Amino acid sequence: MNDTILLVNPWITDFAAYDYWLKPLGMLYIAGVLRAHDYRVGLIDCMDRCDPDLLTWQGIASPKNRLYGTGKFYREIIPKPAVYQSVPRRYARYGFPLSLFREKLKRCGRPGAALVTSGMTYWYPGVQLVIQEIRRAYPELPIVLGGIYATLCREHAIATAGADYVIAGEGELAALQLVDRLLGVKRDYSHFPKQLDELPLPAFDLYQNLKYATVMTSRGCPLKCSFCASNLVSGKYRWRTPANVVSELEFYYEKLGICEYAFYDDALLTNHKNHLQIILDEIIRRKWPVTFHTPNGLQCKLLDQEIANKMYRAGFMSLRLSYESGNPERQKDICKKSNDDYFVNAVHHLYRAGYRVGDIDAYVMAALPGQSIEEVLWSMAFVHAQGVKIRLAAFSPIPGTVEWQRAKLYFGFPQDADPLLTNNSILPIKPPGTTFQTFEKLSLLAKRLNEELERQVVHSDVKRLAREMKGHFSKLELCGISTAKKLHGERSRTIKHPSTSLRMN
């Protein structure tokens, strides 16, 4: 019996991609479980910018990094799928060159089985290609697919991805059971870990040249944001103990020499007095020279002065806040986790803790079902006026979410949409009268305002700034639909323009 299991993280196929601490954490947990049950594990991560073979292929000693280990992926321009032909952007495969992947696949030898993960639903062409290449190299090899795409678009994955088996949801136990069955191993699963603390650590040691690690102190999310599928992907919300998280960080720092960490939690600040603050106290006590980052938005409602102080002292450098929209009705509709007062208070606490103007980012949503350009501009102006950088996040209709249902029921999104159409880069739900150029102008305005914050220039008059930005858009672009219909549907509810009586610094 060949007891080696090959794990593969596929390419990203998209119009844009950037390495903001991107690691296949779920697959690395599975690798840890398989090793704990006496399997040997091999890893090919097509998205590893620091892979020694990739650097040799590129003829460079190290990747070109920006802040805190982030940077651009290697890419190859490829033909656009038919549904993207009208999109005025270049389409690319990000990650290893195809020839290098084939070489690595050949070099690793035939494993007992291959496990392939998947990311965004609209990245599935990279998944298909990886599976085709594995099949080409090892025709009879069992191939298992899991991950986000496999979970949210399971039927599509079964029909088109080319894998022999598809696992949806959390994969540790399911992957072990399936691998055992494929390789003829009989095992008692009654003692399989039932708590997150009992799981082996993610197998980050499989990387030869690791510059950062990703950590989750919890899984799932207690919130139910209208556009998010966290509960579908990660299951019910539960925590690891603070001691278990600190032990993981200690291993990465002491044994692997890692000094950059990104928290992947969807709700990092929930119950922070009994959870995150205890973790931070230990980090501060140990005086580790490390930095932390929060690529997922933090809940403004829960960000008080005490936690702000401890995050600053512990070394949190990249902070992103969840703001989404300056429209009060939309704020309530999304999930009531943020409003303007919560946002201003959170920013104020962070400033008092030691952060400066321009150190903080906030997510602003664009192209939500029923959202006007005017609403986005107001939201951008409000965020900038607090000295916070704007991180525009175009809406992606994620299967199974409230906004997915609204997009289908009220805004013409196809009932049987190809997952490629969920790509936020193509702006699936654009207001009438807008084009790709409309949203390019939004992006350029956000970039300009962010650059001004870097020079400590803040435009504090929200109304005036929003009015000035509106001048960049035509009346046709600004008069798009500004209503959002209730999911239950008997009548529509107007999403009014945000109030002008907003609290300011």
Image (cartoon, rainbow, N blue to C red):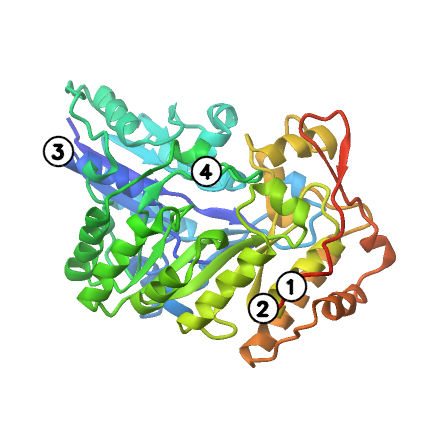
Depth-wise, is mark 3 or mark 4 nearer the camera?
Answer: 4
Depth-wise, is mark 2 or mark 3 nearer the camera?
Answer: 2
The answer to which image quadrant residue 259 occupies is: bottom left
Residue at disc 4, secondary structure: helix
Task: Kindly check if marks 3 and 1 are in contact, taking CB atoms under 8 A apart as contact.
Answer: no
Task: Kindly check if marks 2 and 1 are in contact, taking CB atoms under 8 A apart as contact.
Answer: yes
Q: Residue furthest left?
A: 38
Residue at the image position 39 percent from the left and 51 percent from the top? 269
Task: Kindly check if marks 3 and 4 are in contact, taking CB atoms under 8 A apart as contact.
Answer: no
Regarding residue 173, the answer to whether it shows in the image is yes
Residue with the mark numbered 4: 230
Residue 40, x across and y down, in percent: 17, 38
- Taking the image as shown, residue 393 lies to the left or right of residue 148, namely right
CA gap between label 2 and label 1 equals 7 Å
Q: How many marks?
A: 4
Task: Report the quarter where the N terminus lies.
Answer: top left
Residue with the mark numbered 2: 386
CA gap between label 2 and label 4 equals 29 Å
Decide: is 122 above or below 264.
Answer: above
- Taking the image as shown, residue 147 lies to the left or right of residue 86, namely left
Residue with the mark numbered 1: 382
First in sequence: mark 2 vs mark 3: 3
First in sequence: mark 4 vs mark 1: 4
CA gap between label 3 and label 1 equals 55 Å
Depth-wise, is mark 2 or mark 4 nearer the camera?
Answer: 2
CA gap between label 3 and label 4 equals 31 Å
Depth-wise, is mark 3 or mark 1 nearer the camera?
Answer: 1
Residue with the mark numbered 3: 38
Depth-wise, is mark 4 or mark 1 nearer the camera?
Answer: 1
Q: Amino acid at mark 2?
A: Gln
Task: Report the quarter where the C terminus lies.
Answer: bottom right
- Taking the image as shown, residue 410 lies to the left or right of residue 231, namely right
